[in-house]
Image (cartoon, rainbow, N blue to C red):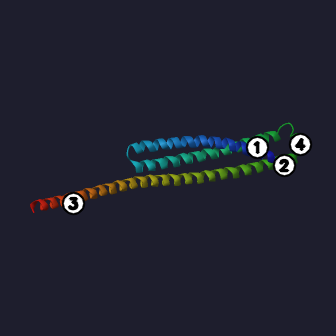
Amino acid sequence: MTQAAILIQSKFRSYYEQKKFQQSRRAAVLIQKYYRSYKKCGKRRQARRTAVIVQQKLRSSLLTKKQDQAARKIMRFLRRCRHRSTGPTAATGSNRRLQQTQNQVDEVVDIMRVNVDKVLERDQKLSELDDRADALQAGASQFETSAAKLKRKYWWKNCKMWAIGITVLVIFIIIIIVWVVSS
């Protein structure tokens, strides 16, 4: 039965990872779509808030779906195991055999529950990490714009200083020329 548990785990993981990838891609596209539409309107703060709200709602609905799917898979597996144990071979088997099968099924169910909990915790950690990355990205873009503004400001100050210096130099040369010509 241990091999059956390993097989179930591997199949569940491959199926779950494929579904998760598709769902995360759809979620990312949806969030980007909302963010871009609000960004075009010039309401950056509202766009960020809206993107975060949409992201949280999407994550909560995905977590609920994942839990429901895992519960359904476990129940299907339990039904199959019970169906096998109540089949024609059960009449010839002893009660001890049925108890062993039930114990193995309980082990597999416990393992699957632990695995689902771990996957959900991992997903929560990934979503927190994603939120942090979004916050860092927003901070980086704000820093970039403020740095560009500061650079532009000091470039104009530098141009003004050059213009003042050249003007003072020209006036000084004119004064010298007028003084030399008049003497």
Helix, strand or loop for disc 1? helix
Q: Amino acid at mark 4?
A: Gly
Mark pair 1, 3: CA separation = 86 Å
Helix, strand or loop for disc 4? loop
Q: Residue furthest left?
A: 182
Q: Nearer the viewer, residue 137 or 146?
A: 146
Q: Can you identify the residue that label 4 sits on? A: 93
Q: Nearer the viewer, residue 177 or 160?
A: 177
Q: At 70% across and 52% down in the image, what residue appears?
A: 114
Task: Specify few, some or many for label 4: CA neighbours under 10 Å numbering under 14, 14-19, or 20 or more.
Answer: few
Q: Quadrant of residue 61?
A: top right
Mark pair 4, 3: CA separation = 110 Å
Mark pair 1, 2: CA separation = 19 Å
Q: At 63% across and 52% down in the image, what residue appears?
A: 122
- The answer to whether the residues at label 4 and label 1 have Cβ atoms under 8 Å apart is no
Q: Can you identify the residue that label 2 sits on? A: 100
Q: Amino acid at mark 2?
A: Gln
The numbered dot on residue 7 is 1
Q: At 51% across and 47% down in the image, what residue appears?
A: 55
Q: Can you identify the residue that label 3 sits on? A: 168
List x then y, in percent, for residue 25: 56, 41
